[in-house]
Image (cartoon, rainbow, N blue to C red):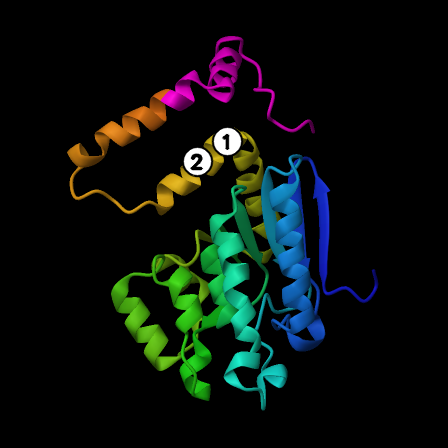
């Protein structure tokens, strides 16, 4: 549809979700939030989808909440009330999510980047937790951002609201990679292709594993982890993977090119 702000397409096991609201720097307006959430639900429920790519049109990935819509609204009517659902959809998606940034992200946009499993940006992309500069706080996004950032950087950048570049974003854990614009698609496609090689159930369970609280010592976790591991070795997916390895072929879950 010509008037939609989020586009959704699937090819070779990859669902590409594109933010397309460049007139307001892909700000998280009510329409964009609704369409983005719907697209994430589609990807989650479609068995043909193995991996999700979150990308954008225009020079900015996402400028955060739509401040025009926030102006004059009471606390119960603020659009930010709907944003936790989107962050949770990204964070808990059983299909890995890769963020592709050809431009800057601010505030809530950074929250989405942090909620993705892998994030790649160009050197020209900049970032800022700009909330304090307008008298609000990065409360909701802290739940996805703080697990990624080292503590010193989080204190500095949350409190100052200063702009930082993609190179620093890699250093502090927000991004996986910063590559020249001409290499962005190749780098992202490499991640997407690698992710489609993993078993769907194994990928989903590995995401859950990464989100688990760590036991105080390895010994306290061995029993649970051994049961989980043995179950996957014996599972239909695990046995298919073992057979495929022995027969030097691709497992049946790998999408056809």
Residue at 28% x, 31% y: name it: 224
- Image quarter (top left, top right, bottom left or bottom right) of the N terminus: bottom right
- Residue 6 in view, yes or no: yes
For residue 58, side relative to residue 85 (left or right): right
Q: Give the residues drawn in magenta, as a range.
A: 231-257
Q: Is residue 178 above or below residue 248?
A: below
Q: Quadrant of residue 27?
A: bottom right
Left or right relative to 96: residue 26: right
Tag shown at residue 135: none
Judge by depth and name the residue closer to the eye, 21 or 171: 21
Residue at image coords 48%, 49%: 92
Q: Is residue 255 magenta?
A: yes
In the current view of this chain or complex, which residue is farthest to the right?
Answer: 2
Give percent across and percent down for residue 254. Answer: 60, 26
Tell me if residue 172 is in the magenta stretch.
no
Q: Are marks 2 and 1 in contact (CB under 8 Å)?
A: yes
Examine the rendered structure and indicate whether residue 168 appears above or below residue 248: below
Question: Viewer-proximal residue, 250 or 216?
Answer: 216
Q: Foreground residue, 65 or 152? A: 65
Query: Does residue 198 appear left or right of residue 167 in this picture?
Result: right
For the image shown, how many numbered marks are present on the structure?
Answer: 2
| Residue 65 placement, left or right of 2 | left
SS type, badge 2: helix
- Residue underneath mark 2: 205
Identify the residue at image location x=32%, y=68%.
154
For the C terminus, which image quadrant? top right
Q: Is residue 182 visible?
A: no
**Mark 1: secondary structure:** helix
Residue that label 1 marks: 201
Give the residue at the far front of this rendering: 76
Q: For mark 1, does the 10 Å Cα neighbourhood hold few (<14), some (14 to 19), or many (20 or more) residues? A: some
Instruction: Locate residue 189, reporting x and y percent.
Output: 59, 42
């Amino acid at each position: 549809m010509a008037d939609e702000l989020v586009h959704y397409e699937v090819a070779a096991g990859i669902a590409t979700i594109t933010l397309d609201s460049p007139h307001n720097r892909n700000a998280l307006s009510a329409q964009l939030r609704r369409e983005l959430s719907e697209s994430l639900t589609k990807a989650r429920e479609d068995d043909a989808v193995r991996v999700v790519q979150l990308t954008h049109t225009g020079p900015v990935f996402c400028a955060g909440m739509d401040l025009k819509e926030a102006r004059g609204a009471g606390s119960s009517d603020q659009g930010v009330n709907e944003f936790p659902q989107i962050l949770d959809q990204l964070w808990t998606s059983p299909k890995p999510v890769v963020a592709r940034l050809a431009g800057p992200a601010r505030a809530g946009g950074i929250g989405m980047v942090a909620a993705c499993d892998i994030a790649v940006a160009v050197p020209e992309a900049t970032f800022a937790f700009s909330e304090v500069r307008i008298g609000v706080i990065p409360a909701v996004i802290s739940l996805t951002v703080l697990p990624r950032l080292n503590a010193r950087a989080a204190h500095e950048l949350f409190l100052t609201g200063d702009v930082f570049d993609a190179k620093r974003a890699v250093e502090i854990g927000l991004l996986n990679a910063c590559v020249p614009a001409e290499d962005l698609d190749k780098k992202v496609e490499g991640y997407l292709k690698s992710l489609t090689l993993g078993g769907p159930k194994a990928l989903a369970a590995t995401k859950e594993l990464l989100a688990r609280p760590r036991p105080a010592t390895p010994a306290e976790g061995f029993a649970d982890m051994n049961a989980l591991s043995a179950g996957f070795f014996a599972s239909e997916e695990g046995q298919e993977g073992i057979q495929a390895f022995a027969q030097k072929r691709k497992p049946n879950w790998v999408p056809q090119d």
